[in-house]
Image (tube, rainbow, N blue to C red):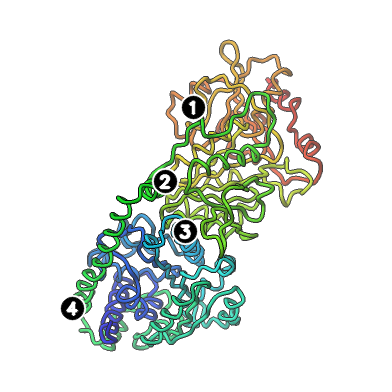
């Protein structure tokens, strides 16, 4: 790629970006202008991709972790042929446009992940790089590499300051992800001014300490950038950080190098002056150099040759190797995954097993049935029962391992688990205590926003945690997860429900599932509904019924279903008990199904060992809710439960109220 065409493409990126932002009167021109040469090189020289098949599994990935610089990405997607039009660029940040304020996965073709919350894209990229190595170990042969690509990331000062980046970088260095390359846009400017107002560390030394290769170049030295990329590719056992010294707003007549250009339009006069600087007619909106357009037309043909060669090798291998063909199809099958009951553990009525243990037993069987299910725990595998003996640990020396030792890095863990799914070909899970879901709430939210099926295993689900006390006893956490749109929260009431909850998680294809599991044992109960497994998928079902119309319907989730059953002998009222593993799924059902479980006019009592707010719409009197609306205390879990009224006697007293 000649230096002159790099300059032409870079200046096209600059003018398109400033025009998008000016027309929208909103956006961030500083990064697109400052890193335009890098963008030109990535899409014009460095990366391997096919805009006609944007989901090609062996494409190089580009993650714009500094998502506020979206105008640069949209300019590149337009130039390189991913389907965006000039009209799309003109509709930047407008309602229902294909060019939203920050890049959105599944919405704009060519966007690999939703970015904007700084550091999130970085952690996703680590997951993408892990997935590449895992799939390569499983699907490549000695002669043919079907999975062999790089993950490139553009990160800024904000990414480097966020803690999730540190977590993810530490993990990436430990795992030796040699095909991960991060470009650090080191321009020394943030919104408030120069970075030295709040940030004075040596980023390169920090990453060296993490086990990274660290290289440096001027952001406008074309040969220097390309040399760094080549050096990065030679280092197979370490991820690479390339620090690019850049100027924010490069090319602006008077604003380059200042914080004023970080996140605001240039203004009409400054745009005219900038166009003059860039050799563009002063009144030419959305100007595209003809040379830039023709360059990418030729580039598409070059890329297509590489793509076609890969397709030929793939077809040849698939037709000649039936084992490869079978495995490939299992890995690459899209949509939800159905796992039959016969492949999963059975629990008999009367057995007493913690749902975290039932989940662990189910996970072992699930991994045997689903070869591309991978994941791990935040250093809590013995406690949340996520150890799968036959999976092996993913490491520098074992790329075929399916268990990821995330360490105590919940925020990065969630982002990495999301990135694994974003890569394609794998399903992922991750696990921690429910109370620490707060540490990865941003990544759970992003999974929901992107509509990807990450499974979050969250154990030790209530004040029943006991001796560890209020710091480890979740109270508001289940409800906090329920209010995130598109998250399916499932709190099973016994081991049998736990197995079905896992099936539901694997069947889900368009959003994450949070499995909420107990530390303490729960007894398997008989179910009145003969087709309860099907009904449970509606969020709630009949566990125990009264003779004739009930006086009271008790609705409960998790451990409180068993508590309701234990309270039955202590009341003379006719009581119906409903298990509600997923309240949000139940609320999506039609009136007929809801009324079949909770008849109109019948008094409702709700029980859940967490905050009451979400159950208030089911009852007429808040005294009919058994809940915990304050923090827990340290003590034996049975004593804690008694202190907070979670006894059969107290629940029966609530049921017996007139």
The quadrant in which the N terminus is found is bottom left
Q: Which of marks 2 and 3 is nearer the N terminus?
A: 3
The residue singled out by tag 2 in the image is 510
Specify few, some or many for label 1: CA neighbours under 10 Å numbering under 14, 14-19, or 20 or more. some
Q: Is residue 180 above or below residue 429?
A: below
| Whether label 2 touches label 1, CB < 8 Å | no
| Residue occupying the far top of the picture | 548
Circle nearer the N terminus (3, 1): 3
* 4 and 3 marks in contact (CB < 8 Å): no
How many angstroms separate mark 4 from mark 1 (CA)?
Answer: 61 Å
The picture places residue 559, in percent across and down from the top left corner, at 66, 33
> What residue sits 77% from the left and 49% below the top?
468
Quadrant of the rendered image containing residue 145: bottom left
- In the picture, measured across the screen, residue 273 lies left or right of residue 544, that is left
Residue 285 visible at all: no
Q: In this view, does 416 lie above or below 609?
A: below
- Label 4: element kind: helix
Q: How far apart are marks 2 and 3 (CA)?
A: 27 Å
Label 3 secondary element = helix
In the rendering, at what x and y percent does residue 534 appear? 47, 27
The residue beneath circle 4 is: 290
User: What is the distance, in whole Å, between disc 4 and disc 2 at their CAs?
Assistant: 41 Å
Does residue 221 sit above or below 542 in this rendering?
below
Residue 590 position, x and y percent, is 42, 28
Res. 162 image quadrant? bottom right
């Amino acid at each position: 790629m000649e230096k002159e065409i790099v300059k032409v493409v870079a200046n096209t990126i600059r003018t398109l970006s400033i025009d998008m932002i000016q027309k929208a009167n909103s956006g961030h021109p500083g990064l697109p202008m400052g890193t335009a040469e890098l963008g030109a090189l990535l899409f014009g020289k460095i990366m391997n991709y096919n805009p006609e098949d944007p989901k090609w599994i062996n494409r190089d990935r580009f993650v714009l972790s500094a998502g506020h610089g979206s105008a640069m990405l949209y300019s590149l997607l337009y130039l390189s042929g991913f389907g965006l039009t000039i009209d799309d660029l003109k509709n930047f940040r407008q309602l229902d446009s294909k060019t939203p304020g920050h890049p959105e996965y599944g919405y704009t073709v060519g966007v690999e992940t939703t970015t904007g919350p700084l550091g999130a894209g970085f952690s996703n990229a680590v997951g993408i790089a892990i997935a590449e190595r895992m799939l390569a170990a499983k699907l490549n042969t000695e002669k043919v590499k079907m999975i062999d690509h790089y993950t490139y990331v553009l990160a800024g000062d904000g990414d480097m300051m966020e803690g999730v980046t540190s977590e993810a970088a530490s993990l990436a260095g430990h795992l030796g992800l040699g095909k991960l390359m991060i470009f650090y846009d080191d321009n020394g400017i943030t919104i408030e001014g120069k970075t030295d107002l709040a940030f004075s560390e040596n980023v390169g030394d920090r990453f060296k300490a993490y086990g990274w290769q660290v290289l440096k170049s001027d952001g406008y030295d074309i040969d220097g950038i390309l040399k760094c990329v080549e050096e990065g590719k030679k280092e197979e056992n370490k991820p690479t950080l390339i620090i690019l010294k850049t100027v924010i707003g490069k090319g602006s007549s008077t604003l380059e190098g200042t914080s004023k250009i970080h996140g605001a339009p240039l203004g009409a006069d400054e745009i005219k002056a900038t166009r003059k600087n860039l050799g563009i007619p002063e009144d030419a909106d959305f100007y595209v150099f003809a040379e830039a357009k023709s360059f990418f037309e030729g580039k598409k043909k070059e890329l297509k040759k590489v793509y076609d060669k890969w397709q030929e090798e793939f077809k040849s291998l698939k037709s000649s190797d039936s084992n490869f063909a079978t495995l490939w199809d299992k890995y690459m099958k899209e949509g939800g995954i159905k796992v039959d009951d016969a492949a999963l553990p059975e629990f008999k009525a009367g057995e007493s097993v913690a749902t975290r243990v039932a989940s662990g037993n189910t996970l072992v069987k699930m991994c045997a049935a689903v070869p591309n299910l991978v994941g791990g725990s935040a250093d809590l595998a013995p406690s949340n029962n996520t150890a799968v003996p036959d999976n092996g640990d993913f490491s520098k020396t074992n790329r075929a391992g399916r268990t990821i030792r995330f360490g105590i890095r919940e925020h990065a863990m969630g982002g990495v688990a999301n990135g694994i799914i974003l890569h394609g070909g794998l399903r992922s899970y991750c696990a921690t205590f429910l109370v620490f879901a707060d540490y990865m709430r941003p990544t759970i939210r992003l999974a929901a926003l992107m509509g990807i099926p990450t499974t979050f295993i969250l154990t030790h689900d209530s004040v029943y945690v006991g001796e560890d006390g209020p710091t480890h006893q979740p109270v508001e956490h289940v409800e906090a997860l329920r209010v995130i749109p598109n998250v399916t929260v499932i709190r099973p009431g016994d081991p049998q429900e736990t197995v079905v909850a896992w099936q539901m998680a694997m069947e889900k294809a368009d959003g994450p599932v949070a499995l909420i599991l107990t530390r303490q044992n729960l007894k398997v109960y008989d179910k009145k509904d003969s087709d309860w497994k099907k009904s449970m998928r509606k969020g709630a079902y009949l566990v125990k019924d009264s003779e004739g119309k009930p006086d009271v319907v008790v609705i409960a989730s998790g451990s409180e279903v068993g508590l309701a059953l234990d309270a039955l002998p202590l009341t003379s009222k006719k009581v119906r008990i409903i298990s509600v593993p997923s309240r949000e799924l139940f609320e999506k059902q039609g009136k007929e199904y809801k009324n079949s479980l909770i008849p109109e006019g019948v008094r409702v009592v709700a029980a859940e060992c967490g905050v009451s707010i979400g159950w208030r719409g089911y009852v007429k009197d808040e005294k009919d809710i058994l809940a915990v609306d304050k923090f827990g205390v340290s003590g034996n879990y049975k004593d804690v439960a008694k202190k907070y009224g979670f006894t059969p006697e107290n629940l029966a007293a609530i049921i017996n109220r007139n």
